[in-house]
Image (cartoon, rainbow, N blue to C red):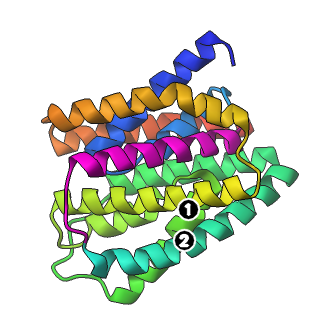
Amino acid sequence: MDLTAHAQMALLAAVASLCQNLTGFAFALIFVGAAGALQLLPIPEAANIATVLSAANGLVYLRNHPFEPRWDLLRPLLASGIAGVAIGLALLAWLSGHTLHGLRIVLGVSIIACAVLLLARSRPRATPSPPGVLWGVGLVSGVLGGLFSTAGPPIVYHLYRQPLSPVLVRQCLVALFTVLALVRLAVVGSAGALSWHALGASAVALPVVMAVTWWQARHPLRLPLALVRWMVCALLLAAGASLLAAAL
């Protein structure tokens, strides 16, 4: 990667981190989607970099935003999500070896589906969903996390429909995605699939991610929730449409 490409990647990481801290998700969706659409990096490589950066972003966020975990929510999500990560990584290896265009299509569709779900999010339920739903949602999220380090869409849609405060939802999402990112990183690293190039690119963008998260913790942006939602959706739709256009 030349200097221009590194600068573009650092800018993507800053935008993704900003959106992640405002919404509790979307870091990897924006970073991997935009990196793939701009052809800065192969999608598997971008997913590995996003995993490193997402884990770092989450750890810094949780350090600066203390909260008491809701284990009744997190236990089933983490257990099924970790299993889903293993399935997603297996699918990623198969798709990478057989069809790169298919990989772009799957990622593009996932990103657009996330944007549509966010825009069409219905009102919160009056009562919590049955506990069993958490296991299914966690599994699907884990598969997406293993594929592209983008575990967001199913669990974001589910938790925001529960009778929970937005702050608690955001903190649960960050905690969940941080753990899944660390698990994915451990599996990829132990398999020897985490290249030195990915680690070097992560090192370039990491200070940007940590600086944005630190700054937001001390100077939180008071943007209307509807505006944040539309901004994130616009970024996701642009990235997803670009990926599909490139693949098709």
* Image point (16%, 34%), residue name: 218
Name the disc covering residue 82, or none: 2
Q: Position of residue 21 (x, y in %)?
A: 30, 43
Q: Is residue 115 above or below residue 169?
A: above
Q: Secondary structure at mark 2?
A: helix
In the depicted structure, whether residue 168 falls above or below residue 24 = below
Q: Position of residue 66 (x, y in %)?
A: 19, 55
Where in the figure is residue 122, as x and y percent of width and height?
26, 64
Tell me the element at label 1. helix
Relative vertical location of residue 202 with respect to residue 52 in this rendering, above or below: above
Q: Amino acid at mark 2?
A: Ile
- Which quarter of the figure has residue 2? top right
Residue at image coords 52%, 57%: 182
Q: Quadrant of residue 175?
A: bottom left
Q: Amino acid at mark 1?
A: Val
Locate the C terminus by quadrant. Answer: top right
Decide if residue 229 is in sight here: no
Q: Is residue 47 in the magenta section?
A: yes
Quarter of the image with the N terminus is: top right
Q: Position of residue 228 (x, y in %)?
A: 25, 39
Residue drawn at (65%, 64%) of the image: 88
**Residue 4, above or below 210:** above
Q: Main secondary structure of the magenta part?
A: helix
Q: Which mark is residue 183?
A: 1
Looking at this rendering, what residue extends furthest in the top direction?
3
Q: Are marks 1 and 2 in contact (CB under 8 Å)?
A: yes
- Mark 1, mark 2: which one is toward the viewer? 1
The span picked out in magenta is 42-69
Mark carried by residue 68? none
Marks 1 and 2, the one that precedes in the sequence: 2
